[in-house]
Amino acid sequence: MAINLKTDPISKSFYQYLWPALTGMVIKSLFIIGDAFFIGQGVGPDGLGAISLIIPPFSIFTAIAMMIGIGGAAKMSIEVGKGNLKTSQMWFSQSMLLTAILSTTAVSLALIWLEELIALMGATGYMAQLAHDYLSVLLPFFVIYSLAWVLSCFVRNDTNPKLATWAMSTGAITNLVLDYIFIIQMDMGMKGAGWATAISQIVIASILLSHFVQKKGELKLSFTGLGLNKAPEILKMGTPIFFIELTSAMTIILFNYVLLTQFGESYIIAYGLTTNVGVLALFVMVGISQACQPIISFNYGANKRDRIDEILSLGLKAAIGSGVVFLTAVWLFSNTIAGAYLGDAQELIELASIALSFFFFGVPLMGFNMVVANLFQAIARPKQATVISLGRGFVFVALGVLILPIPFPTYGIWGSIFFAEAATAIISFGMLRSFMKSGLSK
């Protein structure tokens, strides 16, 4: 069924975007969780620790792709809402070119200084070797990963969210099947995990390209509008999402440093498990935000404030409600979840269970903060979105990591995520209240 952002009821448009976005994000998060499960079973707890240590480099590539993809696609939707259909191709072509340039540069630099990069992440000994095995295989494929991410943003906003979901779902299933074959059956260890992820990215990109072959939307694979004159606007628009990912990497580096120097490798393993399980909640919030973004951007371009307020209300209810469900489930089954990954390591299971419980306590507030940040990004107010992203992604997390262990030496560090989301929610609420009283000045 075709999506008509101009005349369809907001609730209908929201669910037409929401279900594909949620399905894709849930499946993607499940494949990350499954990836961690196979690594835990086939490589051992040290493999989970290695994954935790190398998340920051992965986050940098994701940050580049999301900044360009979401920034460029949002600008395209705003222009379409204004009726400027001819400019959509320019935003797409220039976003793809910019992604290719930045991701290729980043990959080249990472390969040249791979040993130094791993050392910077704090990896030593066996964990460093496992991290090297994984990154040496996967790094060259990060260019394809980045391009596929940007493709999915534009395909979704080109009124074809189902294909983006299908691509992500098929890639996730491919990854899990190959994880089982390479890690469990062929005993390839971390290199097997790297190859499984690399091949799945090729599958995702191939499926997304069918959007252009089948001519499902307005966009085409052509050199029309190719150049970089729109690059500053794309980057400015995508800056908040870039900071979300970049500060996530900085947060993980900070956590890893504090955990290694003050607590030990068992805490690194517990943190690695928590981040891999927590990605399900994070991606659900991303999916809800993605469902709201094209609708908000289109109606901002069309100057329809009432429709923006309606989609914002739906997005907040979905995000906060989902967060409460996640919190309840984890608090009830945290021991079971940790045991599925860590086998009979009872002390590790207890530690990971505590870490999981504290992390998910902040998930409902995470949903609120992400939807509000997405609102400001979608209406071309990146400064407000950046403040929210920096607050919840790094500034308040760093404060929590440094301050909370003083009064609570054993478990204080696990409360830093909740502290960051709560402090940011106060700022987000103030910005949202101001927006509700204002008009749509552009």
Image (tube, rainbow, N blue to C red):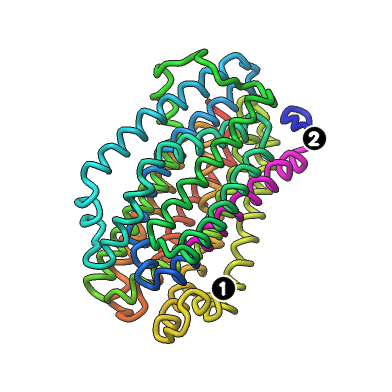
Quarter holding residue 420: bottom left
Is residue 285 something one can see in this rendering?
Answer: no
Q: Residue 1 carries which label?
A: 2
- Amino acid tagged 1: Val
Q: Where is residue 370 in the image (x, y as percent from the top left)?
A: 52, 50
Instruction: Say which quadrant the N terminus sits in.
Output: top right
317 lies left or right of 378: right
Q: Where is residue 63 in the image (x, y as percent from the top left)?
A: 41, 42
Task: Determine the residue positioned at 70% across, 36% down.
Answer: 307
- Amino acid tagged 2: Met
Q: Where is residue 304 in the image (x, y as percent from the top left)?
A: 68, 30
- Which residues are the magenta region? 9-35
Name the one closer to the observer, 326 or 114. 114
Between circles 1 and 2, the one closer to the viewer is 2
Task: Determine the residue positioned at 45% across, 81% down.
Answer: 349
Q: Which mark is residue 330?
A: 1
Q: How far apart are marks 1 and 2 (CA)?
A: 36 Å
Is residue 281 something one can see in this rendering?
Answer: yes
Residue 38, magenta (yes or no): no
Q: Residue 408 carries which label?
A: none
163 lies left or right of 47: right
Residue 21, magenta (yes or no): yes
Q: Residue furthest front?
A: 186
Q: Residues within 10 Å of mark 1 (few under 14, many from 20)?
A: many
Q: Do the residues labelled 1 and 2 touch (CB within 8 Å)?
A: no
169 lies left or right of 348: right
> Circle 2 sits in a helix, a strand or a loop, which is it?
loop
